[in-house]
Image (spheres, helix red, strand yellow):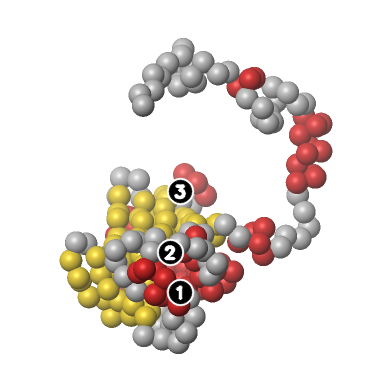
Amino acid sequence: MSMNYRLDSLGNLITHDIPTKDIPGLYSSDNHNLDEVKEKMSEMTKDYYSLEEIFGQYCHLATYIAVPPEITFEYAANVYSLSEWTFSMRDFTYVGGGVYKSKEKLAHETYVFTKVMAYPDSGVIDYLCAWDQGEEMWMRYYFRVINAMPTLRKPGSIVLWTNCRHPYYDRDTENLPPYIKQGHDRTDREWVGDFWMQFDAIHKIELSNLKTILEYRFNHICNLKD
């Protein structure tokens, strides 16, 4: 089925002839005043949040690293760096097609398959991973390295990291492909999804490792130059 797009006068914005005033559920200054939005923000802000509210579907992390973004990116974009700053991925070997196989120390006799997609112009690094097999890289670790100077007004890097809760993480997901079901059904280890609610904690440990390694080495080199 083909679809005809109409470009309107707002910078060639595609609207399909549907103005925002005709879209139900939008909340903006077009239909609410400042006092109303302040009240709504207060209603939406809670003193306490459950683990499910914070980490249920997405896991977001960020840190500042006192190392130039070019160096941070170059290091993190190298797949072998994962053997240093991650908690448990070790002994990488190349298996072809841009994919590397490594041991996963979090689980008994488990291997991780990883492919790194790096885009220096945007500072984006995508770690495409999967336990047990490299046929479907469904465990996705999305990184972005940002220049801290225009963002925090100090030299260095900001690293943003996001994980999304793929259905394969859950034990109760049905109709799994055989190569995933095998891992789900193993009784001699925990499944990667069993750790989902601890992803924030383990990734904070790893992000701290990344920061510590880069800052220690960069400062060491700078001291040598001095």
Callout count: 3
Q: Quadrant of the N terminus?
A: top left
Q: Which mark is residue 149?
A: 3
- Residue depth check, mark 1 versus mark 3: number of the one nearer the observer: 1
Would you say 211 lies left or right of 126 here? right
Q: Which residue is mark 1?
A: 184
Q: Which residue type carries mark 2?
A: Leu
Q: Is residue 40 visible?
A: yes
Q: Which residue type carries mark 1?
A: His
Whether tag 1 and tag 2 are in contact, CB under 8 A, the answer is: yes
Residue 215's x, y, as percent? 41, 68
Q: 196 and 183: which one is in front?
A: 183
Q: Which residue is mark 2?
A: 176
Residue 64's x, y, as percent? 49, 59
Residue at the spot x=75%, y=26% of the render?
Answer: 32
Q: Is residue 40 above or below residue 207?
A: above
